[in-house]
Image (cartoon, rainbow, N blue to C red):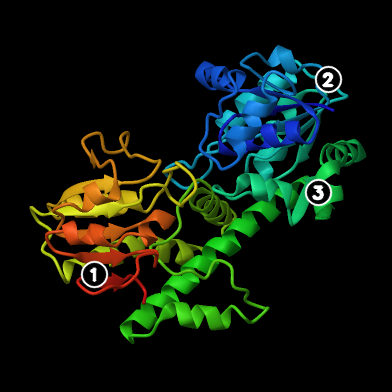
Amino acid sequence: MKASVVGSGYVGTTIAAALADLGHEVTAVDIDPDVVAAIEAGESPIEEPGVDELVARHSGHRLSATTDYDDIADTAVTILAVQTPAREDGAIDPSYVETAAESLGAVVGEDHVVAIKSTVIPDVLEERIDPLLGEATLAANPEFQREGSALEDFRNPHKIVIGSADEVAYERLETLYAGLIESADPAVVRTGLREAMMIKYANNAFLASKISLINDIGNVCKAYDVDTYEVADAIGLDPRIGSAFLRSGVGWGGSCFPKDTSALIHAAREQEYEPEMLAAAHAVNDRQPERLLSLLDEHVDVEGKRIAVLGLAFKPGTDDTRNTRAIPVIEGLRKRGASVVAYDPVATLAEEFPDLDHAASAAEALDGAHGAAVVTDWDEFAALDEEFDRMADPVVVDGRRVVERRDGITYEGLTW
């Protein structure tokens, strides 16, 4: 099938490369000519395990890229996967989706299905996006991929959700995903447009709330000198709870959980309903970085001291720093007068903190430091040992339970 994917970020690039690997002829569309040039050269514009290999394999064959919407006029289906950032009030900004939809509507006809993967509130989808698509058929096809394992999640989906009011959309998208349906046997959920989008919001809201709940429980455990991870391991054996997303720590970040929970809270309040549990999940998450800093304060007066921040990406396996917990940690350290040096294997915060000292290795970051805050659970941090001997004061506050306790280190877990 000839397919197109609009938006070549973390979601769009993964999907475009994976669809090409399934045998489809895929055209990626992006407004950034540098992104298009990278894909055309066989280079992935994102840091995501396995995607670079697929882009290199299929570029020039089943995968191409363009900035011109006219180049996708003859495709059968378009996956629209552009960003929907949050506004200051928590509402989503649908302008990128609207611009893309308008451009699509100008070149595709009635025998074309546009599947929205970008996350938007149901009213926005029906009232603002659909009219821009002209005669094309609208569908909602939310994604459930995690950064750092996006390709694996695409290939082994637990569910494929298709929302539409038209049988053509169901059939077209099921044909697009036929290879996955045959190999992975996921649940295929046929539903309405509104329901499909709310499934995405509800999915992320549940996961974000689960993390915040175990973090809240972890904070109580910390007060009673109880190992939160032992508690979590035990309650995770209950099939009603499950073991996933029970790693207590410094909180969630990234592009999805923060903006999707904020958007759902904002949308609920617009309907004059106060979503107290969602608001509480957000509040718990927002205060975790300060709790980490408070633990550091108990051992080190950071003013004028060199403090290492290990991990800048919001999670391991990606270079994405959107809403990373490292940002409030660094801000808090600087407010306390600390001299911050940071290290991450692939990510930087050069845009957010132009004068931030980025070390070339964890050892360099720890050299002469009077304290260290672990924010991202990269595997290489678990292997650190003699590097801590280079610290002026070996004080480690671990926000992800990745560093092993050892003699010679003053170690604090955030919630254990």
The picture places residue 229, in percent across and down from the top left corner, at 46, 77
User: Which amino acid lies under the numbered mark 3 shown in the image of this protein?
Assistant: Gly
Residue at the left extreme, as displayed: 304
Residue at image point 61% right, 24% down: 99
Number of the label disc, if any, that sits on residue 85: none
Secondary structure at numbered mark 2: loop
Q: What residue would you read off at disc 2?
A: 109
Q: What residue would you read off at disc 1?
A: 295
Q: Is residue 400 left or right of residue 361?
A: right
Residue 273 visible in the snapshot: no
Identify which residue, 314 or 134, lies in the foreground: 314
Identify which residue, 57 or 161, lies in the foreground: 57
Identify which residue, 390 or 70, lies in the foreground: 390
For disc 1, the neighbor class at 10 Å (few under 14, some 14 to 19, many from 20) is some
Q: What residue would you read off at disc 3?
A: 192
Question: Which image quarter is the N terminus in?
Answer: top right
Mark 3 vs mark 1, foreground winner is 1
Whole-angstrom CA distance, mark 2 to mark 3, is 22 Å
Residue at image point 77% right, 50% down: 160
Answer with the quarter of the image where residue 173 lies.
top right
Residue at the front extreme, as displayed: 386
The picture places residue 340, in percent across and down from the top left corner, at 19, 48
Question: Which image quarter is the C terminus in?
Answer: bottom left
User: Which amino acid lies under the numbered mark 2 shown in the image of this protein?
Assistant: Gly
Q: Earlier in the sequence, mark 2 or mark 1?
A: 2
Whole-angstrom CA distance, mark 2 to mark 1, is 60 Å
User: Which amino acid lies under the numbered mark 1 shown in the image of this protein?
Assistant: Leu
